[in-house]
Amino acid sequence: MSENTLTRMDLSEAVFREVGLSRNDSAQLVESVLTYMSDALVKGEQVKISSFGTFSVRDKAARVGRNPKTGQEVPINPRRVLTFRPSHLMKDRVAAGNKK
């Protein structure tokens, strides 16, 4: 696996090793899962993965921002943003990893 980044290829390689599917089938499986998740988020649905976390889309309203360099006010358009909220188990697991 890559040193600091987990990629699609890393995921499909893990499926290949753990499940025993062919490399091609493993890559297709990972791609299908990611596509299914993306499609659900585009529709505005939440994606909950037990013991991992929840992905959701939030609508942010228009607001006035400020350019920190010049101090000039700048309008910020309304937009949709993707958010992730980790489960308590994931939070605990990550925190435990920091203690090493």
Image: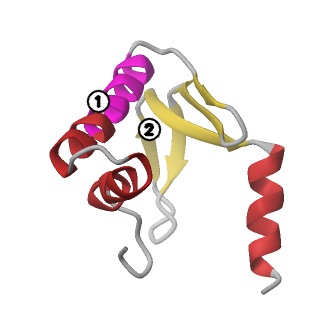
| Label number found at residue 76 | 2
Which stretch is magenta?
31-42
Q: Which residue is drawn at 44% across and 77% down?
A: 4
Residue 12: x %, y % from top left:
31, 52
Contact (Cβ within 8 Å) of mark 2 with mark 1: no
- Describe the element under mark 1 as helix, strand or loop: helix
| Amino acid type, callout 1 | Ser
| Position above or below: 80 against 12 | above
Relative to 50, 25 lies left or right: left
Relative to 83, 4 lies left or right: left
**Circle 2 residues within 10 Å: few <14, some 14–19, many ≥20:** few
**Circle 1 residues within 10 Å: few <14, some 14–19, many ≥20:** few
How far apart are the alpha carbons under marks 2 and 1? 35 Å
Q: Residue at x 51, y 62 (%)?
A: 71
Which residue carries the number 1 mark?
Answer: 32
The one nearer the camera, 31 or 47, is 31
- Describe the element under mark 2 as helix, strand or loop: strand
* Residue sitting farthest toward the bottom: 100
Residue 95: x %, y % from top left:
81, 68
- Closest to the camera, between mark 2 and mark 1, is 1
Residue 5: x %, y % from top left:
41, 70
Q: Is residue 40 magenta?
A: yes
Secondary structure mainly formed by the magenta segment: helix
Q: Residue at x 36, y 76 (%)?
A: 2
Q: Which residue is drawn at 41% across and 82% down?
A: 3
Q: Does the magenta stretch include residue 77?
A: no
| Position above or below: 43 against 67 | above
